[in-house]
Amino acid sequence: MSVRPQQRPAGEPTRVNADELAAPEQLSGRTLRSRVALIALAVAVLVALVTLLPGLGGLRSRLAHADPAWLAAGVALKLLSGLGYVAVFRMVFCRRMSWRVSTQVGMAELGANAILPTGGAGGLALGAWALRRGGMSAREIARRTVAFFLLTSLPNVLGVIVIGCALAAGVLAGESNLLLTLLPAAIAAAAVAATIALGRLAARAARARAAAGARTRRARAWRGSLLALGDGVEESLALLREGDAVLIAGLLAYLVFDVAILWAGFRALGAAPPVAVLALAYLIGELGGLVPVPGGIGGVDAGLLGTLVLYHVSITAAAGAVIAYRAIALVVPALAGAVAFQLLRRTLRREAGQLAVCAPDTEMEIIGVGRAFVDGRR
């Protein structure tokens, strides 16, 4: 913990608007209950379709004879993936936050992602609310949120590049069609370059607007968005240059263990396709998760199923594995996230300092130093 002499009058409170401390509308009890009800309805419809539609006898048989041990392994893998998410959250947002509180925030975010129709942004909104309650500035939260989103997306993109090139070169067994291997890899590489370039352009545009002056609320909001994007890209690159083992391990765990859930789903119902093909299909198919539906139901499922079939996986085997994967990826985070959210609310009520330590310029009593401001940026 680094401290420095006071630079403003002692006792002067951090200025935070009251509306920034209130829970976001998407985290209200009414909204959450409606999302849970919508997910339950979607699950009921899926069960009815699988049970009643003709021509799905093979799928029904596979699901009825699923191996419970492999399904239990999938649950354990989802929890391990969640711990990877927690590690990345702590390393990006506040390394001074305790692991206990980091786990509460991270798992609550995953739970929100499972039930909120925001393509993953619902969880980030929850984390932003918690950190704002701790006094972290909106600009700091925006910068780190962009960096967090980019970093957690990076393994997926790099995975497409590495696996696609390896399959195209014949290094890995599986699909060899260049349109299904090298083309996705090239698109992913172009996306990485475009993101870095866009971040730098956004930073320059934000500086230009600052020099010109932003007179309207819309202009200030636009400048803030450009600044968050530019700073977030730079922050993500700086974190990668550090090469921190915990961050890298967290990023890998978050992705690899989640891919392994799909593999466990295949094994629970029978044989699994080659790991390289399964992983590449997962990475491409998961883009359906950007569709804003609760838990990714429909978007992710259709993307995964369609991509697996495109890579010559039996549609019956793929459908069964995707259903198993979706059930685990939806239920486990929702249950763990609900518990974590309740614990987080208790922490915010009783242990505000656990989050306040993450806010830059937080005034605290340091033994042997006295009253000092804590540099909470790392």
Image (tube, grey):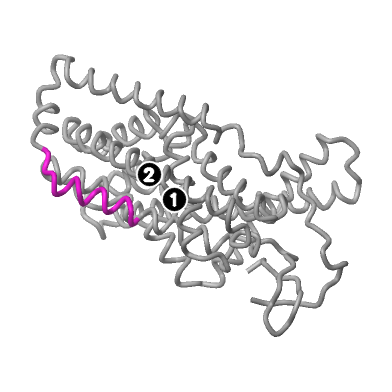
SS label for mark 1: helix
Name the foreground residue: 347 vs 65. 347
Count the marks.
Answer: 2
Label 1 crowd bin: few (<14), some (14–19), many (20+), radius 10 Å: many
Q: Residue at point 61% right, 66% down?
A: 238
Q: What residue type is labelled 1?
A: Met
State the image coordinates of residue 41 (x, y, percent, origin top left): 35, 21
- Residue 78: say if magenta: yes
- Residue 72: say if magenta: yes
Name the foreground residue: 106 vs 233. 106
Quadrant of the snapshot with the C terminus: bottom right
Decide if residue 272 is on the left or right side of residue 292: left
Q: Mark 1 points at which residue?
A: 107
Q: Mark 2 points at which residue?
A: 333
Looking at the rendered structure, which numbered label has been put on residue 219?
none
Magenta-drawn segment: 66-80
Quadrant of the snapshot with the N terminus: bottom right
Q: Residue at point 44% right, 50% down?
A: 107
